[in-house]
Image (cartoon, rainbow, N blue to C red):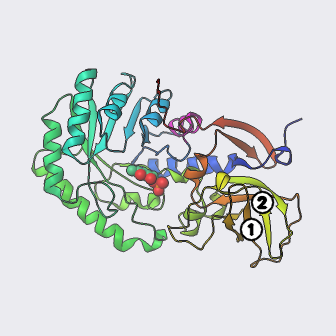
Amino acid sequence: MPLTIAELETPMPVVDLDRLARNLDGAAAYATAHGLALRPHIKTHKSTRIAGEQLERGAVGVTCATPFEAEVMSGVCNDILVAYPPVGALRAARLAALPRTTKITVALDSLAAIEDIAAAARDAGRPVGVYVELDLGMHRVGVPRIDEALALARAVRDRPPLVFEGIAFYPGHVREQPDQQDAKLEELSARLGEVIRVFDEAGLHPRVVSGGSTPTMWRTHELTGVTEFRPGTYVYNDRSTASIGSCSWDDCAFTVLATVVSTAVPGQAVIDAGSKALGREPMRGVEGEGFGCLLGRTEVIVKSMSEEHGILDLSQTSWRPVVGERVRVIPNHVCIVVHLNDVIVGVRGDCVETSWAVAARGRGYTIEI
Ligand SMILES: Cc1ncc(COP(=O)(O)O)c(C=O)c1O
């Protein structure tokens, strides 16, 4: 007899396989329709199995943030972008030590990072591709000025075995509903056009222009010159992506299955998913909107938490759960919640079909003292 969802222990991270497949298919079809290279960011799922499904559907490679993610993904993917500054000899050496059959590219924004990855690439005797990162509005990493970016690209060109491959940016500052992104996307597009023109005139044509996020993914083709996009959250989606309209509630594939353990205090119900199961990330960085909401009852939010207790606010619903009842929580930020778990369970309807490891969770350090 197959296991049903009612037989699972709680709290349990559960993925709806039909929704996952739909999300994967949608992104792949969009990439094909617009001739864009899809290089999904695996920070959301950290799983070789889902990376494999993305590659099978036509992804050109994957994007990682950490050396451990890249090490784990090199088991299934031979074209990896590490979209994180390769600063520090240890980090750079780990990247350069990835299998030679894997094409490695890094995104960076400083001469120090160039020197670190150039030294590691020379020591390892292998090429490493480089995207020069520009800040086009998010104000996290990336050089703000085109002349600075050009200087970095020249420094890369002068340091074989580094190979200048192109430019990168992350539009993380665009978090409006897709139909309200016009002003920011137009500004982004104009800046990109200018960057590409200046690079071309300098004889440093960016073969790749890499951008993309989940909130902007369906409008990537409108951005001047973009060749590659890197959405991550879209595989599972979450309360944040649904609430800003970059997906519908029906596209939320990941939930935390939980059990109501107390209704003793009026106006609330307590579930066995607290901060150690749901994370503690506020919505859009703003306190007061809770830490998740219920699948099928999005008006019911997890208003507060202790480590193993989640407090459901029942003030906006006539629903009155009983002790022992099961609920499924859509977390605010799914990437953080996935990273709290070793294993994810895949379900189809009520049927538990499969499970997979969050293989790239953690840092993969080897410390011997
Ligand atoms: C550099 C970079 N690229 C792509 C992504 C994916 O963006 P999203 O999670 O909106 O899909 C992220 C997310 O943090 C990122 O940091």
- 98 to the left or right of 348: left
Q: Amino acid at mark 2?
A: Ile
Q: Which mark is residue 49?
A: none
Q: Which residues are magenta?
A: 46-56
- Name the residue nearer the viewer: 233 or 201: 233
Residue 365 against residue 183 in the figure, above or below? above
Residue at screen point 64% across, 57% down = 252
User: Residue 66's spot in the image, x, y percent?
Assistant: 43, 40
- 362 to the left or right of 88: right
Is residue 49 covered in magenta? yes
User: Residue 364's spot in the image, x, y percent?
Assistant: 49, 32
Q: Helix, strand or loop at disc 2?
A: strand
Quarter of the figure with the N terminus: top right
Would you say residue 269 is visible in this rendering? yes
The quarter of the displayed image where residue 100 is located: top left
Would you say residue 254 is visible in this rendering? no
Residue occupied by mark 2 = 271
| C-alpha gap between disc 1 and disc 2 | 7 Å
Mark 1 residue crowding within 10 angstroms, few (<14) / some (14–19) / many (20+) = many
Q: Amino acid at mark 1?
A: Leu
Mark 2 residue crowding within 10 angstroms, few (<14) / some (14–19) / many (20+) = many
